[in-house]
Image: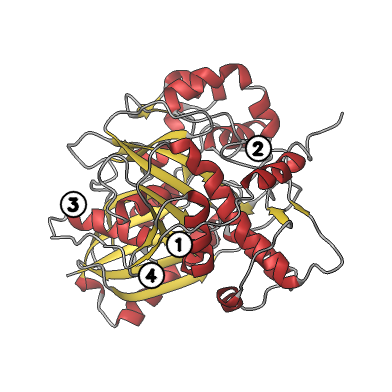
Amino acid sequence: MLLLAIDEGTSSARAIVFTTEGEVVGIGRRPVPLSYPHPGWVEQEAEALWQAQYEAVQEALRVASISPAQIKAVGLTNQRETTLAWHPDTGRPYGPAIVWQDRRTAPYCEALQSKKALLRQKTGLLPDPYFSATKIQWMLQEGGVPPTAQFGTVDSWLLYKMTGQARTDVSNASRTLLFDLQSLSWDAELCELFGVPKQSLPPVQPSGSFFGETRIWGGRWPILAVLGDQQAALYGHGAFEPGQTKCTYGTGAFVLKNIGPRPLPAPEGLLTTVAWQEAGQPALYAWEAAIFSAAAALQWLEQLGLLSDYRELDNLEGSAGEVFFVPAFTGLGTPYWDPYARGLIIGLERDTHRQTLLLAALEAIAYQTADTLELFGPISELRVDGGVSQNALLMQLQADLAGRPVVRPPHGEVTAWGAAALAGRQAGLPMRTLTPAVKWEPRPRPNLLERWREAVRRAQGWARPTS
């Protein structure tokens, strides 16, 4: 029996056909361009998101050499917080999607600092442009979007295109600043605070439940799971017990730790979020660290012509030493939460080489992750996935800096597998749990984390308006 995962990421739309054993049968992929129309703005065209995903599914079916009838269930996973608005009847987008990395609403968030305790208590989040509420607020106040629009995150938009109905799940809803973690519902007080019409938001369902049927690709496929990408990765790792922790290295890097069936207040700097909920079951929760730039740092080097082949990173050796790269292109997330921080490279000398900058970019990913892991308390091992986790040098460095073993499953499609596995479980199919295939034990090394933090301090507040 076969399952389809639809995986709408920040830089690409992917579709993956799995067996119930977790074996990859076929993959389709299409790039999704990002645009940067003004400093701090990051956008994607709504129809381009859908078209890329449509073509990715077609390609996955073709590569797998299967008919649509062989797919038994669909799981959807997506970049979170990215927000769209469209006409509820015609489906016409009111403009581009505002991407999670977008910083345009930083002034809105500054005005919300007096509400920080309320937001933390109800949503587990902080007033930051990362989350969806101020994006909707901006659309209504400055973007010319009417209050009668349908607002939603990427999952809602794709579900609307696939089934004709906008819906969302608890994991995506919990990333908006409008969702109460206790009641698992949109909160009227928060909607009023942000000026968001509650009726303009999609209905919320358990992550594992029936989201409708799609016939777009020729089959009749039940969509039985929807998960935000980081929660899907946690599920894909089989991190079902409290304390189990993963880090996904994609455009950003995100650490999630299962904390069980109660939304425990997170340590300062971390977030509390919904991990997932299955139909008829209590929700499970997680603590989260959000690092905005991981592979984004490597993509930036590629754009500059300093990196032409990612395989070169596999052959790097040594250390960047006293050269530090703070990739705060769109501000800093955990633990600093500074929307005005900007990127910095410090420690350059005349004999600094291109390879040193490549090493500094890799090390920046490990430093950022290690900087957040200290907040989580005891962690026995760190489970990893995502494209950058395929770099052995980085994973060894991560183990060394974290002082904990780092383990990686047999393939890198953990996020997509999480969505497919939850859909398969809802369909009553026997699902396999992925087991680690590679392990890195921590080794003694000079720990330059404090020097890294000094570089971060110099990057903070750089873009803050001066007048």
Question: Which residue is located at x 29 percent, y 65 percent?
Answer: 4
Residue 223 visible (yes or no): no
Nearer the camera: disc 4 or disc 3: 3
Q: Which residue is mark 4?
A: 57
Nearer to us: label 1 or label 4: 1
| Residue 160 to residue 218: above or below | above
Report x, y in % for residue 73: 23, 61
Q: Tag 2: residue type?
A: Gly
Q: Depth check: give the residue in front, 131 or 151.
A: 131
Q: Pointer 2: residues within 10 angstroms few (<14), some, or many (20+)? A: few
> Which residue position holds label 3?
426
Q: Residue shown at 52%/42% (left/top)?
A: 372
For mark 4, give the secondary structure: helix
Q: Which mark is residue 144?
A: 2
The residue type indicated by label 3 comes to Gln
Please state which amino acid type lies under the numbered disc 1.
Gly
The residues bearing labels 1 and 3 have C-alpha atoms spaced at a distance of 25 Å
